[in-house]
Image (cartoon, grey):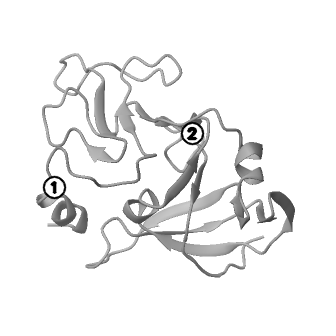
Amino acid sequence: MNTVGRYMADKKVGDKLFSDLFTLKSDVGNPILRQTPILNDNRPAKPVTWVEKGLLKAVGADQGATPNMSLSQEGSNLSIEDMIRQTRRGLLVTFFWYLRGVPSEDQPLLNTGMTRDGLFLIENGEVVGPVQNFRWNMSPIVGYNNLTLVGKPVPMHTGESYDGLGTALVPPVRIEEFYMTSVSPAL
């Protein structure tokens, strides 16, 4: 069993998994996502709330949608500028170059990647300048537990190519203690 399977094996509906700021749905029929409303077995899909305010609401098969179908993470009306103004010190990440899973017995869904094409230092609510790109290691399970701000959701490609099949609605987020592990040689 993989680490995600082991992590989820003892989880049940109602368990607190993430920050109160995290709600994730399969928003079947969303006109922005324009994804199929039909399941692989030709049954009609239906909207499913997977996580609501950090609480597990649905798990397993036969929920009416697949866990990666028409994903939409709820947000707020905060703009990125509003979020920057509310940040004492941090990094503004404008682009993750790639994401790769890292085999780990200790952390389910551990991922790694690098920042690219714009990483900026925020001090006292203002962007003060660019910084060198970083390699990072983080599990979304840890990250979504450490949310402190969530902005307005925007469409985002879910694959590595911009013309890929998947799109999700994802807000910008502020994650406390995001693990930047080393300076990256990427420009």
- Looking at the rendered structure, which numbered label has been put on residue 156? 2
Q: Secondary structure at mark 2?
A: strand
Between 164 and 62, the one lying in front of the other is 62
- The quadrant in which residue 113 appears is bottom right
Is 125 located above or below residue 34 in the figure?
A: below
Q: Secondary structure at mark 1?
A: loop
| Quarter of the image with the N terminus in it | bottom left
Bin the neighbour count of mark 1 within 10 Å (Cα to Cα): few under 14, some 14-19, many 20 and up: few
Between 72 and 163, the one lying in front of the other is 72
Is 119 located above or below residue 151 in the figure?
A: below
What residue would you read off at disc 1?
11
Left or right for 149, reference 73: right
- Upstream in sequence: badge 1 or badge 2: 1
Please give the name of the residue rendered at 72% of the width and 79% of the height, measured from the top-left corner: 185
User: In the orientation shown, which residue stands out farthest toward the right?
Assistant: 128
Is 17 located above or below residue 46 in the figure?
A: below
Residue 23 x, y percent position in the rendering: 40, 40
User: In the orientation shown, which residue stands out farthest toward the bottom?
Assistant: 182
Please give the name of the residue rendered at 21% of the width and 51% of the height, measured from the top-left corner: 15
- The quadrant in which residue 178 appears is bottom right
Residue 138 x, y percent position in the rendering: 46, 69
Is 150 located above or below residue 46 in the figure?
A: below
The amino acid marked with disc number 1 is Lys
